[in-house]
């Protein structure tokens, strides 16, 4: 994280080669651009600082131009900031955002081999109790934890799954990397492997008449504990219009994708299971 007292604000992820590059100054001192050998390339004399309403700070926006790929240093007075210009600087952050869903998996172990320091045993594997009829119990494992309260909600989960599906559909080259999850190497892009984990759970939340239960949650939010230590009873909440409508975009994409996959493949067979959910 950048020191909030820094006079030079930059894109910390990196700058894309061939696209405009800017820095924000909180100083009227000159901004100097240095190459990797500390040779001065350009010097900017910022205009008067103006108030930025969002931050409440007085700033100057400096157009750095379009720099070639490489490592550079920005210098303002005694302060320096290093920046990088790459052909595709967003790969790491994109992969981290997608793999973030893996760490939210529920009902299964997250081995250290895949989860690193976020490893933990399987959680929330006991049958859930129907909120309206406490004599009914159903085992509905899987899906993603919505947050630290470990609830699982059809609406937000379906929307997140749809976002991942359409991200891959619209920008397949930008989110096609292997993410080092258990399914890696099965011939399916990992962004789709991870999305399937949530879609499988959504199928379990659908009632026989097509309606979807609203959520799977506890009577009270869990305290700040690890998921495997959250042993309170899970409840299956009633169906709702909101939950029933939310999965439609998520089902539409996989149900319409069977033509692009071998129908006899495991993935093709699974996609055909999605078709009733899309109706």
Image: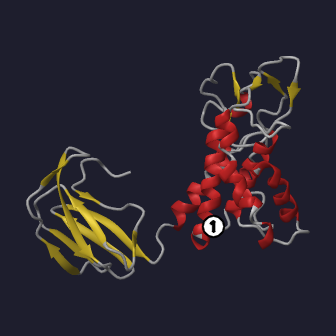
Residue 113 percent coordinates (x, y): 73, 54
Q: Which residue lies furthest to the right in this view?
A: 264
Residue at image position (64%, 40%) is 155
Q: In this view, does 225 lie above or below 252?
A: above
Q: Which colour scheme is used?
A: secondary structure
Residue 166 percent coordinates (x, y): 61, 61
Residue 256 percent coordinates (x, y): 74, 63
Image quarter of residue 224: top right
Query: In this orientation, which residue lies closer to the viewer: 251 or 65?
Result: 251
Q: Can residue 228 be seen in this view?
A: yes
Residue at image position (20%, 44%) is 56
Q: In this view, does 133 lie to the left or right of 232?
A: right
Q: Is residue 175 left or right of residue 122?
A: left
Query: In this orientation, which residue lies closer to the viewer: 97 or 36?
Result: 97
Q: In this view, does 221 lie above or below 181?
A: above
Residue at image position (73%, 30%) is 239
Q: Mark 1 points at which residue?
A: 169
Mark 1 burial class by Cα count in 10 Å: few <14, some 14-19, many 20+: few
Is disc 1 placed on a helix, strand or loop? helix
Q: Residue furthest left?
A: 48
Q: Is residue 180 visible?
A: no
Image quarter of residue 236: top right
Numbered disc total: 1
Residue at image position (21%, 55%) is 7
Residue 133 percent coordinates (x, y): 83, 18
Q: In this view, does 35 lie to the left or right of 101?
A: left
């Amino acid at each position: 994280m950048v020191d909030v007292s820094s006079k030079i604000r930059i894109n910390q992820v990196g700058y894309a080669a061939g696209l405009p590059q800017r820095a924000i100054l909180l100083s009227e001192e000159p901004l100097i651009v240095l190459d990797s050998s500390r040779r001065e390339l350009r010097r900017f004399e910022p205009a008067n600082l103006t108030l930025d309403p969002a931050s409440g700070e007085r700033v100057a926006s400096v157009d750095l131009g379009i720099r070639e790929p490489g490592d550079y240093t920005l210098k303002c007075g005694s302060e320096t900031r290093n920046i990088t210009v790459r052909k595709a600087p967003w790969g790491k952050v994109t992969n981290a955002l997608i793999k973030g869903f893996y760490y939210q998996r529920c009902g299964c172990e997250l081995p250290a081999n895949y989860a690193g320091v976020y490893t933990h045993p399987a959680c929330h594997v006991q049958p859930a109790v129907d909120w309206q009829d406490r004599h009914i119990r159903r085992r509905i494992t899987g899906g993603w934890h919505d947050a630290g309260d470990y609830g699982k909600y059809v609406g937000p989960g379906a929307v997140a799954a749809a976002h991942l599906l359409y991200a891959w559909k619209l920008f397949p080259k930008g989110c096609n990397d292997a993410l080092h999850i258990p399914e890696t190497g099965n011939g399916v892009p990992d962004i789709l492997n991870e999305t399937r984990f949530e879609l499988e759970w959504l199928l379990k939340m659908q009632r026989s008449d097509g309606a979807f239960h609203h959520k799977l949650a506890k009577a009270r939010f869990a305290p700040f504990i690890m998921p495997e230590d959250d042993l309170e009873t899970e409840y299956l909440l009633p169906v709702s219009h909101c939950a029933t409508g939310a999965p439609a975009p998520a089902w539409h994409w996989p149900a319409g994708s069977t033509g692009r996959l071998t129908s006899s493949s495991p993935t093709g067979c699974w996609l055909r299971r999605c078709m009733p959910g899309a109706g």
